[in-house]
Amino acid sequence: MSNPDPRETPAARSETRVAWLREAVTSSGPLHVRDAAEQLDVSEMTVRRDVRKSPEILQFLGGHIVLSQEGAPRAPYDLSAATDTNEEAKRAACRACLPLIKPEDTLFVDCGTTLPHLINAIPSDVELTIICYALNIADLVVRKPKIKLVMLGGVYHPSTASFYPAEEDTTLDAYAINLAFMSAAGVDARLGVTCTTFREATLKRSAMRRAARSVLVSDRSKFGQVRPARFAALADFPLIATEEGLSAPDAMA
Amino acid sequence: MSNPDPRETPAARSETRVAWLREAVTSSGPLHVRDAAEQLDVSEMTVRRDVRKSPEILQFLGGHIVLSQEGAPRAPYDLSAATDTNEEAKRAACRACLPLIKPEDTLFVDCGTTLPHLINAIPSDVELTIICYALNIADLVVRKPKIKLVMLGGVYHPSTASFYPAEEDTTLDAYAINLAFMSAAGVDARLGVTCTTFREATLKRSAMRRAARSVLVSDRSKFGQVRPARFAALADFPLIATEEGLSAPDAMA
DNA sequence: CTGTTTTTGTTAATTTCGTAACATTAAGTT
DNA sequence: AACTTAATGTTACGAAATTAACAAAAACAG
């Protein structure tokens, strides 16, 4: 591999190396310091200093350079594992949903940080069709070869990692959904089930309208919360899944 | 964190732990052996043995447990890029395209293993709109906050990591594309530019029709190759980018 | 050109990881 | 119950990674 773009100014040669590293790591995965040093034709120490100077872009994991996004520790062996307090609750709520899923079903899966756990929990050998509109969901579904994936396209919204159609979307018309797994930012007995944006609410309503049944999947911490965009009443869900299992909406306070 | 699903049979408790680890790692990223041992309430050694026993699922990188999909640590939306050939040539071809891109442009970016390098090469501070239909492209674009992303939805096809619309898709009608960066599986002076499936060819043609200009980005190894689905003539591209830089189609043999 | 600053390279010391060897406990069997 | 087997825990040691400290080289300013 050749030295890329060798600018004359040595002041910002480090910058070039970081860019090269970022590119190499994103496209080919983790790279060992040893190899990086060899391919960039500098010492390991220089590579280490480069990486350490750009903690937003790169970091070490063992002796390997990786992208620094996400839950990975910042310093080499520092582990301030940002433990999502609700993660275990979300996981439990998703586990409770598994019995509802039958082979050959067509499922709608909502966006957010709850339902990825559902995808993970689905056994790899079940044949399903999953319709989604969130990038993180699609990314997980894709790893289960038995699942057919349909993605609703649109403009990307970073806050939810989701795509929302520009106008009226007709894609959903072509599908009959057995079960829609919905998530929410707020769940209130009186004010209903809410999310943050109206775009999102519109899409959620479309999905629920086309689904035979909808299940609300939410940990208890969401209960009592209210967000601006209302997309359903609590009674619209025949079942609600929380960390305590499945229950009927009238059992919720 | 509680012990998950404690089956009585100790014979396959290891299996349960591996499942738990896989879930934890997929949803929260790299996990340190130390933490895993603590949270599973077993010794580090046991965790190590579990990980070593399931090399298809988990592996170590430094002291951290990561998904073993081709050694890639899990980035937020990680689609581990399939084994890429001619990587350096593709990188060079993509670098040659950079001068064509102007701020505020709307670009169409094709699927495959070439154009991800283009996304990586785009500086983070350029404002752009990018229209794509491949999961791996979307995954990279999403990391550049200044770029607005439009995803064309549809049914997922694993061979290209792309979504193809069920029927006629009208999403593209709403956009005017300055520049379409196209990739191909085969490039032949006489037989034209080809890909493997007709679905893909249809979509490529739509994109090119709506773009002011189209650039073919391809390393030289594709030249002379022919695939079943033809989507353009070589002359349809005012510019062709290879590892040797930009050139006109008639300069190609 | 000279002195200063910055960048890079080298070495050594420290910490951490990974594994092997062995002890211990639990499960399964006759 | 006693034996066998498998799973887990503990300790110790070698290999590797990380840092610190210092030396060398290159850029920069006056």
Image: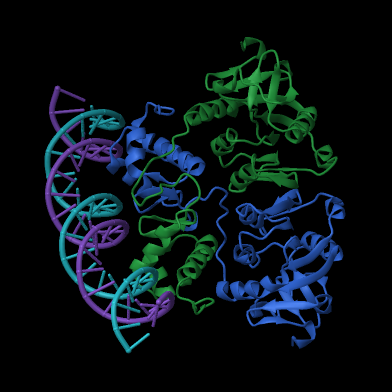
Chain colours: A green, B blue, C cyan, D purple
Q: Is residue A128 left or right of residue B11?
A: right
Vertical comparison of A205 with B133: above or below: above
**Picture coordinates of residue A135, whole percent (x, y):** 65, 45
Q: Is residue B194 left or right of residue B46?
A: right
Q: Is residue A88 left or right of residue D6?
A: right
**Residue A29 versus residue A66: which sits nearer the camera?**
A66
**Picture coordinates of residue B30, whole percent (x, y):** 43, 46
Q: Is residue A136 visible in the rendered structure shown here? A: yes
Vertical comparison of B234 with B144: above or below: below
Q: Residue at x 70, y 35 (%)?
A: A108
Q: Residue at x 56, y 52 (%)?
A: B78
Q: Quadrant of the C terminus of chain A?
A: top right
**Picture coordinates of residue B165, whole percent (x, y):** 80, 51
Q: Is residue A105 visible in the rendered structure shown here? A: no
Q: Is residue A226 left or right of residue D14?
A: right
**Residue B237 versus residue B191: which sits nearer the camera?**
B237
**Picture coordinates of residue B57, whole percent (x, y):** 46, 48
